[in-house]
Amino acid sequence: MADTKVGTAKVGASAVGAVSAGNVTSSDIKVQLSLVKAVGKSGFGIPLILAGGQDQEIPYTECLDLDEVRAVCGVNSVIYTAAALMLAQSTERFKIAVRAVTGKSAEEIPNLLGKDWRQLVVPTEGADGESTVEELSDVVEATDRMYFATVRDLNTVPEAAYSGIQDGQPAQIARDRTVGFYYPQKGVYATAALVGKIAQKQPGTYTCKNLILDNLQPLELDDTMVQSVQDKGCLTFVTKAGDNVTTEGKTIGGEYIDIVDGKDYIIYRIQHDSQKILNQSDKVPYNDNGIAQLEAACVGVMKDCYGDGNLIIATGDDGKPAYTVQYGKLSQTSAAERANRHYSLGRFSFSLLGAIHSADVNGSIII
């Protein structure tokens, strides 16, 4: 089944209510994106390790290796333990962020949204006096980030959907920004390994199923138990064909993790590249030439996300990249928008390139 994304791009201070990715507190570009699932067909941001209920505060600090984490947190902290597992997933250095608070971790998240982190790992989740997985999920689901929870008890997994507001109306919204990793062994923060494995990868080049994780022991689970984990919207870590790998790579809400990543990456890129045009021009004229500059930024992102190792956008039945970009002409804008220097007629859509997660192979024996 193919997934089609439909989005809009807006320019100007009066654009509100959009979903965006990254540190966007000072951006003039807002991008909205909805997911439309067709029937019948088939490393951006950095990880943040946040610990609540600690004896002393540690300010938000970005680190490039375990030595830098040790200098900030010491070797006896849960942050250091999680960071060691996270950084062990690559032979190359990559940036992570750490933060410790004396209060609850969920209460600190809003204060950190101006920072450039994307994947949240909370090694203290569920501890006495600390935020629960559900409390952390409720906060993150209202943002453009993702929360990776290590689940010790399947009974603590929040429901796949939560009550919220969508398109101005009350709705049940899927928890597509929360990932549950079932790993009951205390003191081992399994999601740190998963995040470490994917944080350095370009969106579109990976899925979260069958990932080999280092320095993490597989669980001995039978098929029934693995299915119970997946029925709760979680993944886990088992042995297949002699390799220790993750099971199905979905969010608690049921969406594939790589789909959320691909969507967020395209939003971020359109926003970033369009903002660069505003930053680097003395003036972007409100005429067809100025609109064409913004359209070119969007087209450039689509091209970058297709082919040559950029595996977010699929190929259509006609053999061409499966995306469209259409920005309305000046004659289609309203007098009010022109007076407010606001443009809202940018439109784009694209089909996501899927992945093979399983296969049936039929054969016969000739005697």
Image (tube, rainbow, N blue to C red):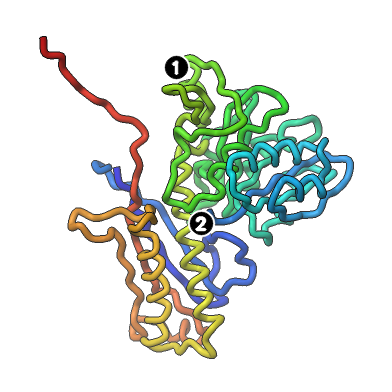
Q: Neighbour class for label 1 at 10 Å: few (<14), some, many (≥20)?
A: few
Residue at 23% in and 55% down:
316
Q: Are marks 1 and 2 in contact (CB under 8 Å)?
A: no
Residue topped by disc 1: 223
Q: Position of residue 232 (x, y in %)?
A: 52, 27
131 and 223: which is toward the camera: 223
Furthest residue toward top: 367
Q: Where is residue 251 in the image (x, y as percent from the top left)?
A: 50, 38
Above or below residue 291? Residue 243 is above
**Residue 323 seen in the current view:** yes
39 and 355: which is toward the camera: 355
* Left-right relation of 334 to 22: left
Residue 168 - label? 2
* Left-right relation of 357 to 159: left
**Residue 142 seen in the current view:** no
The local secondary structure at tag 1 comes to helix
Above or below residue 364? Residue 281 is below
